[in-house]
Amino acid sequence: MKYDVIVIGASPAGLMAAWKAAEGGANVLLIERRESFDSAPSPADTSFDGFFKMIGLEPEEKYIIHKVKGMNIISPLGTTITIDAPGFSIDRKRFDAYYAEMARDAGAEIKMSSDAIALNEGEVAVKEGENKKMYNGEVFVLAPGVNSEIVKETGLKTMKYPEDLAYAIQAEIEGVEVDENYFHYFLGKEVAPGWKTTISPKGDGKASVGAFVRGKSPKEYFDRFLQRDMFSKAKILSISEGADQIITMPNELVSDRLMVVGGAAGQAGIAYGMAAGMLCGEVAAEAVKEKDGSKRFLSKYEKQWKKKFLNQYRTGRFGLKTIEKMSDAELDEAMRALEGVDISKQLSKHDNVILNSLSTGLLLLWNNPKLIRFAKYIL
Ligand SMILES: Cc1cc2nc3c(=O)[nH]c(=O)nc-3n(C[C@H](O)[C@H](O)[C@H](O)COP(=O)(O)OP(=O)(O)OC[C@H]3O[C@@H](n4cnc5c(N)ncnc54)[C@H](O)[C@@H]3O)c2cc1C
């Protein structure tokens, strides 16, 4: 079978790429290895209104299960900085099904239980149950998530710092005693070296609780976190594991007839992956119309995405790398100095939150003479 555009992986990035390529007039096939959108949904289940606004989408009530006013960032010794940034928890089964429907309505064909096993010169081999089938395409969009064999085989160095992947354990838990008006992010070497431990409320005492760690296994941090009082009546409903590309930095994303998007491309986060997918789908449709799938033509996607978003990743990397060098006591002291500073106002000048909150916070230290000694970490 011959298609204009073949998308591999129904990740947020892949679904958007299939939707936009089909909307642009291309004949699109989306290949997904899961049996259905109900099976093994991704653990990524939160986002922010600001992220969706930034990428030009409205979050849909159909998949939102809980809304928050913002986030609490909690230092190793318990100093809390509250940031106003409305956000929401997502039911991933409904989220994936919603955007798959958009792609189908635009004309894309979606094949579930289909595992792409090899990609060669305009042809992808797909395992469908016991059968192996070959599909031909003009342009391929790879959106199969992080650590994918099919992406490794392209030879592209899609992440600049792959060694900086964070590994995570996340559980859905009921009976959590926490303020459900906020997402809660705990920082520090004791709680999650290299990134964060999170509580994302889902309403009625349910929450996703995750430990995201770089350079070590997250298991001991996850287990230790669950010993806290707020979980004394809690019951674990399900557990998932995964890798977060948070500061790996997108790098080489394109070659002839090929674009890589989403986690596989170091584009961490649901919204950034969706933005990349939309752009990539539009460029794929244009490439088909122009009969030009060359690396030069497809580079339009990489250039535009990087122009819009790369600086936000740079700021985030700067924030986390700076915190990495601080002891827990220093991080606490730095955060105490920021208590009462209106980071939300500073942030309103930018599109982004979370990582940029940290980075903005660190940059604010420049204006605080008491904390000038921390400048050595920032430089
Ligand atoms: C535990 C955890 C929690 C996270 N929470 C959040 C969060 O709350 N909010 C947020 O913004 N980000 C979160 N992230 C980061 C987020 O997961 C990623 O940045 C990104 O959203 C995931 O999309 P992805 O592109 O990696 O693809 P994935 O979501 O991994 O999807 C890839 C899809 O491709 C399919 N696939 C893979 N290989 C093949 C193949 N060969 N053939 C066919 N199909 C294939 C898979 O079945 C899957 O459906 C979290 C990460 C982790 C590890």
Image: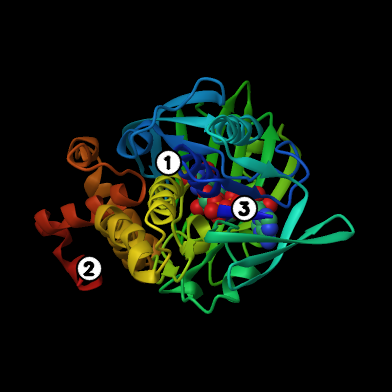
The image shows residue 129 at horizontal and vertical percentages of 86, 55
Farthest residue toward the bottom? 155
The residue at the point 53 percent across, 24 percent down is: 66
Residue of label 2: 378
Query: How many residues crowd around disc 1 within 10 Å: few (fewer than 14), some, or many (20 or more)?
Result: some
Q: Nearer the viewer, mark 1 or mark 2?
A: 1
Identify the element where label 3 is drawn.
loop
Query: Of label 3 and label 2, which has the lower sequence position?
Result: 3
Residue 271 % position (x, y): 43, 43
* Dot placed on the residue nearer the N-terminal end, 1 or 3: 3
Kind of residue at disc 1: Gly
Which of these two is toward me, 341 or 288? 288
Quadrant into which the C terminus falls: bottom left
Of circles 3 and 2, the one toward us is 3
Answer yes or no: disc 1 within 8 Å of ligand 1.
no
Name the residue beneath numbered marker 1: 24
Q: Which mark is residue 9?
A: 3
Q: Amino acid at mark 2?
A: Ile
